[in-house]
Amino acid sequence: MSGEGGSRRYEIIEALKTGGSAEVFLGLMRGENGFVREVVIKKPRAHLAAEPRFRAMFVDEAHIASRLSHPNIVQVIDLVSNPTEVYLVLEYLSGLDLRELLRRCFDVGKLPPIDVALYIAAETAAGLDHAHRATAADGAPLNIVHRDVSPKNIRLTDVGAVKLIDFGIAHAEQRITETAAGSVKGTPGYMAPEQALGEPLDRRSDVFSLGICLYQMLTGRNPFDAPELRDRMMLLFKSPTPPVSTFRADLPPGLDELVARSLARDPLERYATAAEMGRDLEQMLHGMGTASPRARLVEVLDELFPDLRQARPSLQSALAAGGEASSLPGWGDTSTAAYAQTHVPDTELRSVAKTTEVSTAPPVAPALRGRKLAPAVIMVAGLVAVGAVAASVIGGTERVEPRFDPLEPRAAPRSDPPVRTPTVAAEAPDAGVPVVEVPSKAKPKTKAKDSEQHISPEDLFRAAAALSRRGSHEDARFVYELILAQPGARAKPTVLRNLALVHRSLGHMDRMQACFRDYLELRPDAKDAARIEEMLEAGEAHPSVLCLSADEASLVRARAARVGSRLEAWVEDARE
């Protein structure tokens, strides 16, 4: 695989993660005279690479990021785009993202040190300010808004650098492609109110998202997290946000006010720029007397991740072997089988530990995991001043950041009954094996109505099973949930059982339990019932979580209406 100039060669070392819209690989860039450099290679998923609009969006990301040269923003090295392939080459950042740091802190029962949290936020603010002020080659302002500032997009290196990554959904004046007016993109739980409503955004929207990240580092909780979507909207638009000092008493003077200003619901009351917020953060850091915040971050990372500096075995082997560059497995075609064995799922992050500063009661997992949103109308009960909120799921299943579970009990979600729908497969006796067979008498059924294709549950089931076999668990989850989301239908056990196994593959143990509970309710005498019950008893109980709530079913149906062509492609692939 060659770069555009022909002198750069990229050798793929291993798959790092696969989201719904892109695959990320660790690689080596080889050049003349033994030159070698570790890189990250990002390419669209095969089913999206052929779509002109998505391809244009992917190229847009490269053009936007190429205008950003700053120590706190990931560096773009190369873009390759030709009729057969398209991929982005980025600098390799040895380390982890902020969500991984938070997870480890929760696991060991403590919160990140305050000076480390302030440093991470200040460095992120510096990167954001540079992006907000970026200009095109002719000097015209790009007016970039990142739109997805969340822990998964804040990268921490093993030498203490903080880098903002992933400008894939950023808004910019000179983008070739742009989101339709009124649509919503971003990470649920990290959006500013105006972003959740689909209103025009500016740099202050990113400030709000950074404020949520800072609040979470300081308290271990997302102030806008709740079990149900309507509850999250209530928190975002209506309910007062508890001051940080409610959960942590050792704060320096003024930090409560700083966080509150970053999270002001009215943009006019917020920090006008990320630079202004960053200056206040740096002044507070200086007042705390931390000589080198970067060194403090390195100390914390070394303590929590003793093996962080060890090179990946695959990278060590590749460097020792030398050799020629190789193509990505499946590069240029739709196959993912070549690297399926080494694929590492991008599992969701959940907070499961306790801290001494907050309640020690076990957390309750949120009912809706992070998903990107697009236009749909969701009526929010009790929001007199707000009215309708635009929120639904856009095309693509790219992984987005889930909110961390609060470290205190929450009110149980409404006891909506799980949505039921028919399926066609027979169950398998092994609780660890997904059901993938469909009775031979079930024939594909498609019916055209007003030029719209209606895909049968049988075809959806085949597609979901095929996606699961390929390791595309996020896509499989969406299709299984779409089967369950059909109004007025009754579920048979197999869909619930397969969906439970998909949740287990993704690390959603609370959802796995909920779907298995519904499966056993319908099939208490199943051959694998005893094994499943053992599994449920061995894990932490999440009795209040639903397999699929009514609100989530609405979001799934809205998303399906926008990604019909992708569903049809999955169905066709499953028939082959």
Image (cartoon, helix red, strand yellow):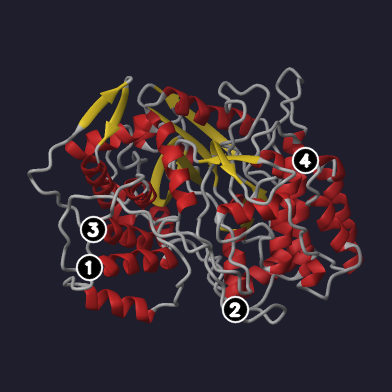
For mark 1, what is the residue? 523
- Which residue position is annotated with label 4? 204
> Residue 257, located in which quarter of the rendered image?
bottom right
Work out whether residue 253 or residue 483 is closer to the camera in this orientation and state it.
483
Q: For this view, does 257 lie left or right of residue 346?
A: right
| Residue position marked by numbered label 2 in the rendering | 108
Q: How far apart are marks 2 and 3 (CA)?
A: 38 Å
Q: Residue 494 carries which label?
A: 3
| Quarter of the figure that contains the C terminus | top left
Q: Position of residue 472 (x, y in %)?
A: 34, 48
Residue at mark 1 to residue at mark 2: CA–CA distance: 39 Å
Sequence-wise, which precedes: disc 3 or disc 4?
4
State how far apart marks 3 and 4 are (Cα).
47 Å
Name the one closer to the observer, 118 or 501.
501
Query: Disc 4 or 2, which lies upstream in sequence?
Result: 2
Sequence order check: which comes first, mark 2 or mark 3? 2
Placement of 541 over or under 442, stated as above or below: below
Q: Residue at x 28, y 54 (%)?
A: 491
Measured from the top left, where is residue 203 in percent x and y?
76, 37
Marks 4 and 1 sit apart, C-alpha to C-alpha, by 52 Å
Front tag of 4 and 2: 4
SS state under label 2: loop
The answer to whether the residues at label 4 and label 1 have Cβ atoms under 8 Å apart is no
Q: Residue furthest top?
A: 138
